[in-house]
Amino acid sequence: MKLPPFQALLDEHRVDVYRYCVATAGRSEADDCFQETWIAALRAYPKLRRADNLRAWLLRIAHNKAMDLHRSRGRRPVPVEAVPEPATGGAPPPGEGALPDGEPELWEAVRGLPPKQRTAVFCRTVLGMPYEELARLLESSEDAARRNVFEGLRTLREGWTP
């Protein structure tokens, strides 16, 4: 198996990986997610055994890094001038960011989907990823990948209005 030079891999997939990071982590976290993805990929690249679907491999790393960033948000202190009154309930404020050429509210709704649905919807609708490749990315069957796209889109249609 012959792997392409890492720079060629970066050049070929950086746009898709960055757009995925924006869609899943939000604009404010996308740069960190993107950087962490490529650092992890560079570290793992020499040990890679299969080169048949490098895009799915990279997007899987980006997915993991976005989830790490999402989990770490809850542990970060937020500086404020004054301590706010205790909340009386309701949903937390939405995050920031959107795809560069998309509607911010829509991509906020996409980020609110469960992780597999979020990845499936983005990869299928934005990247045009075939279900076979999506299944490898999600580590599932093609039927499960299709179901994640279907469920994610259905949830978006029911809960988001332009």
Image (cartoon, grey):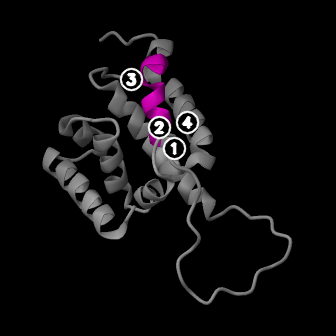
Up/down of 8 relative to 110, above or below: above
Instruction: Report the residue that reaches farthest toward the left.
Output: 143
Q: Which residue is mark 4?
A: 34
Residue at image point 29% right, 58% down: 152
Quarter of the picture holding the C terminus: bottom left
Camera-near label (4 vs 1) is: 1
Q: Earlier in the sequence, mark 4 or mark 1?
A: 1
Residue type at tag 1: Val
Q: Is residue 160 left or right of residue 124?
A: right
- Nearer-N-terminus badge (3/2): 2
Q: Amino acid at mark 2?
A: Arg
Numbered badge on residue 22:
1
Question: Which residue matches tag 2?
Answer: 19
Mark 4 or mark 2, whichever is nearer to me: 2
34 over 111 or under it: above or below: above
Say which element carries label 4.
helix
Look at mark 3 in the image and give the residue it sits on. Answer: 48
**Residue displayed at 81% across by 79% down:** 83
